[in-house]
Image (tube, rainbow, N blue to C red):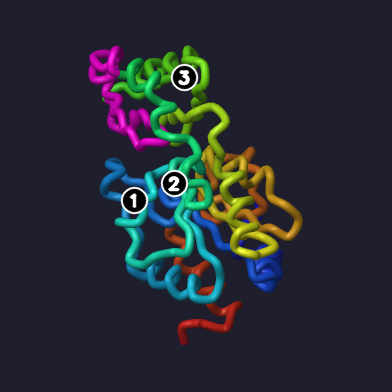
Amino acid sequence: MRHLFSAEGEQALAAAIGLRPLLAFDFDGTLAPIVARPGDARVSAAVAKGLERLGRTLPLAIVSGRRVDDIRGRLHFTPRYIVGNHGAESPLMPEANPPSLLDPMRDRLAKSATALVQAGVTVEDKGRSIALHYRLAPDRSRAHEVVDHLARTLDPGLSAFGGKLVMNFVAEGAPDKAEAVARLVEHSGAKVAVFLGDDVNDEPVFARAAPGWLTIKVGRDDRASRAMYCLDGPAEIEGLLERILDLVGDGIR
Ligand SMILES: [Mg+2]
């Protein structure tokens, strides 16, 4: 995969920005570096400022696995759109996927509570999705076995997908990030999207990108990624925002 800051990538970026796209960003691992404790994740002041300025010119969205309220508290500005829970919590579909759909999973987790604690797995109930984190587990392969077993023996009406040292549970048929971004493009009146993400659950967006879209994978950890270009990591986001501000005629000089 080519780096976005190559001659070809810069050209693709200029072409996409020229189409006045929706700008959509994943949060963890994209805007904010991955940290051991998810509660510690933050965007830098420079990134927050760049996003706020871009949001005055282009429709801007954060599309995260976190709850919408959680994201809101981590930004120092209000973007036009925040989608949470991997696409399942969208301001465009406020009534969809009520949290009660995950009650069977809550019962199941309550019964497995001791095994989860022993394996060092942390349960994060986010309403419209539930995450089982094992980044801090003393034996990650053992912890993975425990969460993988839960994912393979799901109750009907539920579905599971992995991420970076996490397993996520949602209601079957809940919108994923690809569907959420497609709806935002339509709602915003933009014709295309520029989307950045770093993880497994961002791949559906990369795979379903329509002509004219620009997709960017943050990190080089997945050679099979369907994104068009990559950045080395979240540390390059500030430079990207400066380039986009230049392209829309709002450069910091
Ligand atoms: Mg991410």
Q: Distance between the residues labelled 1 and 3?
A: 26 Å
* Residue 98 x, y percent position in the rendering: 43, 35
Q: What residue type is labelled 1?
A: Asp
Give the mark nearest the N terminus, 1 or 2.
1
- Tag of residue 69: 1
* Residue 233 x, y percent position in the rendering: 47, 54
Q: Distance between the residues labelled 3 and 2?
A: 21 Å
Give the answer, above or below, for where 241 lies relative to 169. below
Helix, strand or loop under label 1: helix
What residue does disc 3 label? 151
What residue does disc 2 label? 84
- Tag of residue 191: none
Q: What residue type is labelled 3?
A: Ala
Helix, strand or loop under label 3: helix
- Asked if disc 1 and disc 2 are in contact, CB closer than 8 Å, the reply is yes
Residue at 49% x, 70% y is 55
Give the mark nearest the N terminus, 3 or 2.
2
Give the mark nearest the N terminus, 1 or 3.
1
Helix, strand or loop under label 2: loop
The residue range painted magenta reads 110-137
